[in-house]
Image (cartoon, rainbow, N blue to C red):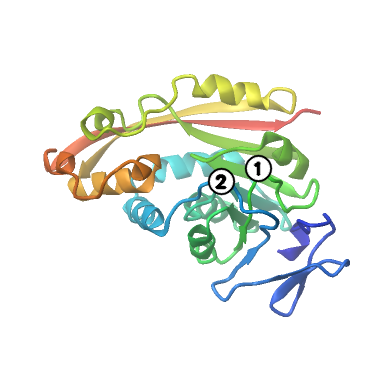
Amino acid sequence: MAGLLACPECRLGLEAVDRALRCDRGHNFDIAKQGYVSLLTGASTKMTGDTAAMLDARAAFQGEGHFAPIADAVAAAVGPVDDRSASLLEIGAGTGYYLAAALDAAPEARGVAVDVAKPAARRCARAHPRAAAVLADAWRGLPVRDGVLAGVLSVFAPRNPAEVARVLDADGRFVVAAPTARHLGELIDPLGMVTVDPDKDRRITEAMSGLFEPVERVAVEYPMKLDRAAVAQVVGMGPSAHHAENARDPRLTALPEQVEVTASVTVSTYRPRR
């Protein structure tokens, strides 16, 4: 996997040496005992990553299969990956759930999970046997060589289109999954959750123009029957967790034992402009 990565200091390629990655100029990056490598250098990043508690909530919710249709749609959007050397990368990978689904659908591919939060990097290191975990800030630049990736995923995560265009090969695909204004709509008012910007889709389209051309857009919308524990996980795993007082919020206990909640996501696929 080291052959995909670039030194964040000088952009030269990295090679695995013992328990570290090293470039020809001598920059050295140790592989942590938890299995990830930190390629985050310089001043502290301004990006706010997920906490361990948020990731625990997300892993529990994903583990129940509530977002499996979204994961399946993302994996399908990547398309067939037949090249044994093909590689996929997920930005803001979190638990590595969506990258793992894409790798399961492409048995010969390898994966790289990139996240800015150490708890996420630790978890991603265990997400899939063919995936490596990298601690990095995608907005500073992906620590990846030019044109080496067959696919890049961004699922409920920030994007850096210019960097994605740089690291994708000419036939690569950029898969972006973003919530619509209907996503989790039944919970927003009762629980005071953060709403989705109704202009989000237009902003994504504008950010892609000039670098990418659209290939396909798929709407994934379905009802989920969630008990209170699952609802608490939804609150705890996303941006609303930064605003929630605690998981025992009386607004949670006021809900029925089971709530039908809408999952609504648009999965958009792009390819680099030729």
- For badge 2, the amino acid type reads Met
Q: Name the residue under label 2.
A: 47
**Tags 1 and 2 touching, CB below 8 Å:** yes
Q: Where is residue 88 in the image (x, y as percent from the top left)?
A: 65, 51
Residue for point 66% across, 57% down: 40
Q: Where is residue 65 in the image (x, y as percent from the top left)?
A: 34, 49
Q: Position of residue 179 (x, y in %)?
A: 44, 31
Q: Name the residue under label 1.
A: 139
| 14 relative to 216, above or below | below
- Furthest residue in direction bottom, as rendered: 18
| 125 relative to 112, above or below | below
Q: Tell me which label, 1 or 2, sits earlier in the chain.
A: 2
Residue for point 61% across, 22% down: 205
| 132 relative to 182, above or below | below
The residue carrying pointer 2 sits among few (fewer than 14), some (14 to 19) or many (20 or more) residues within 10 Å by Cα, namely few
Closer to the camera in the image, 147 or 36 = 36
